[in-house]
Amino acid sequence: MQDPLNTESIPELTLSVVLFRSPLEQLRALIESAIASLQAANLLRTQMVCWDNSCDAAYSERCKSLLADFSLDAHLAITHVIAENNEGYGAGHNRAISSCAAQFHLILNPDVQLAKNAIRLAMDVMTARSSVALLAPTGCSDCGEPEYLAKAYPSVWVLGLRAFAPSWLRAFNERALARYEMRDQPRSGVLRPITLASGCCMWVRREYFDKAGGFDEQFFLYFEDYDLSLKMAQLGKVLEHNQIRIVHHGGAAARKGVRHIRWFVGGAIRFFRRWGWKWCG
């Protein structure tokens, strides 16, 4: 990570997205939503780094062609970096973030779409409240169903329920799932403190992100965002903004095949070893 930044001489915001053969129609939708949101926030030529972990020349060429459609945009300047090796999600964002400088940085998945006012609302909070280290949005699926992106500290049991259990068993354990997804906590006001934020979309204060050492690259995929949330909470506030909205097209690890299950289980073990085991609840 870079040294602490001189906020008087750098841009307000940069963005990064890590790709791994990600659907290009989703990437296009993300970029179009980011441009609209940057325009609403009156931010010009904001740097966005697309870090391509695909290790697939044909995919990277198609991605390059798509990004060329936005080369003259007044609000977004996109850099496409093709990684020689796929070192993981967190490592990709670390490399992308270290290549740019700003007071704040927006970490994104390619399967996210931002609401038009998302960046403006986030920048208002981050600039007005110097204690905020990380800011998270609220989300919904592409079908309009709520996605509970903010989480409480997990147990082994509840992670297993969400990732692998049949619907009847999840229904039987609804109270435990509601606690984990923070649905049992009444909302009061626009901002609320949360324990864990989803890496699909998070604004971070660069000074604190750098002090935290960025994402731990020992997590290849899954739980690096939870680990970062807890590290950032040691430096400042981790908050959810209930008026910042995104659409998230993501899916569960169990539906993505054996490799994802292995990454999920390995990440969970590393997370609990670092931050403490919680078996039930």
Image (cartoon, rainbow, N blue to C red):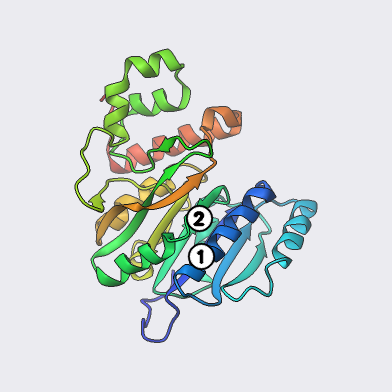
Q: Does dot 1 land on a helix, a strand or a loop? A: strand
Residue 171 to residue 127: above or below: above
Q: Residue 158, percent across and down?
A: 34, 26
- Find residue 108 and name its label: 2
Residue type at tag 1: Leu
Give percent across and percent down for residue 261. Answer: 53, 30
Could you tell me which residue is drawn at 54 percent across and 64 percent down? 36
From this view, report whether residue 198 is shown above or below residue 158: below
The image position of residue 177, as x and y in percent, is 32, 27
* Amino acid found under the numbered disc labelled 2: Leu
Q: Which mark is residue 15?
A: 1
| Badge 2: residue crowd in 10 Å (few <14, some 14–19, many ≥20) | many
Relative side of 21 to 258, left or right: right
Residue 165 is tagged as none
In the rendered image, which quarter is residue 153 located in? top left
Residues at circles 1 and 2 in contact by the CB criterion of under 8 Å = yes
Image quadrant assignment for residue 124: bottom left
Q: Nearer the viewer, residue 94 or 75?
A: 75
Query: Which residue is most to the bottom?
Result: 9
Q: The residue tagged with tag 2: helix, strand or loop?
A: strand
Decide which of tag 1 and tag 2 comes sooner along the chain.
1
Q: Is residue 95 visible?
A: no
Quadrant the N terminus occupies: bottom left
